């Protein structure tokens, strides 16, 4: 599990197994600095490549349960379909450009620009020090991953407006 500080919780030793998600999440990521660089990143994403979409601190729909019932995000067990990924990219791009009032992006991080497997997207309204120089850097607001995500337990739940945004994207109203 990932705790609110962004660290993997539990005792990890040299012989402890780590998940593919833990290795990606804790691995090196590169900042997407320019808006044109973000546009190029989105164009490299294959929506049908098996992306898992996670909103940190927001409940997500359970697999096989009607979307009117929700469970915590840790229950994400299947990748989103291509339409959901395309819709997410379109809407998160619009949100970032509307709410991050800077001439640069700098709040999206990717493990590999040419073959992305993990994308951390920070909420423009909850930035703190996303570069990790703080003792308690904020968690990403959203994560796109090509491997099943582990639970991420925030200190506090996402603001209601972000919950509504995520639920409207998923059709969970």
Image (spheres, grey):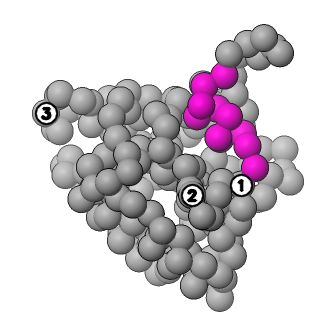
Q: Residues within 10 Å of mark 1 (few under 14, many from 20)?
A: some
Q: Quadrant of residue 86?
A: bottom left
- In whole angstroms, how far apart are the C-alphas of marks 1 and 3? 36 Å
For the record, the magenta segment spans 18-28
Labels 2 and 3: the sequence-earlier one = 3
Label 1: state its secondary structure: loop
Up-down: is 143 above or below 42?
Answer: above
Q: Nearer the viewer, mark 2 or mark 1?
A: 2
Q: Residue at label 2? A: 115
Question: Tag 3 or tag 1, which sits nearer the N-term?
Answer: 1
Magenta: main secondary structure: helix
In the rendering, at what x and y percent does residue 109 appear?
64, 60
Residue shown at the point (34%, 41%) measured from the top left: 79
Q: Position of residue 60 (x, y in %)?
A: 33, 39
Q: Earlier in the sequence, mark 2 or mark 1?
A: 1
Circles 2 and 3: CB distance less than 8 Å? no
Secondary structure at numbered mark 3? loop
Number of the label disc, if any, that sits on residue 66: 3
Residue with the mark numbered 1: 29
The relative height of residue 106 versus residue 144 in the rendered view (above or below) is below
Measured in 3D between alpha carbons, the distance from the residue under mark 2 to the one under mark 1, in whole angstroms, is 12 Å
| Distance (Cα) linking label 2 and label 3 | 34 Å
Name the residue rendered at 68%, 16% in the picture.
17
């Amino acid at each position: 599990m990932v705790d609110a500080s962004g660290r993997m919780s539990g005792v990890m030793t040299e012989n402890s197994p780590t998940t593919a998600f833990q290795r990606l999440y804790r691995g090196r990521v590169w900042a997407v600095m320019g808006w044109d660089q973000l546009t190029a990143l989105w164009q490299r994403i294959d929506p049908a490549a098996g992306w898992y979409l996670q909103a940190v601190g927001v409940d997500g729909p359970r697999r096989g349960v009607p979307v009117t019932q929700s469970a915590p995000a840790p229950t994400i067990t299947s990748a989103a379909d291509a339409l959901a990924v395309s819709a997410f990219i379109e809407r998160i791009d619009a949100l970032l450009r509307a709410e991050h009032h800077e001439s640069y992006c700098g709040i999206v991080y990717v493990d590999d620009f040419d073959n992305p497997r993990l994308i951390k997207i920070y909420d423009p309204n909850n930035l703190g020090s996303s570069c990790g120089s703080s003792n308690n850097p904020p968690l990403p607001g959203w994560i796109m991953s090509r491997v099943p995500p582990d639970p991420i337990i925030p200190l506090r739940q996402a603001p209601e407006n972000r919950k509504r945004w995520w639920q409207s994207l998923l059709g969970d109203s």
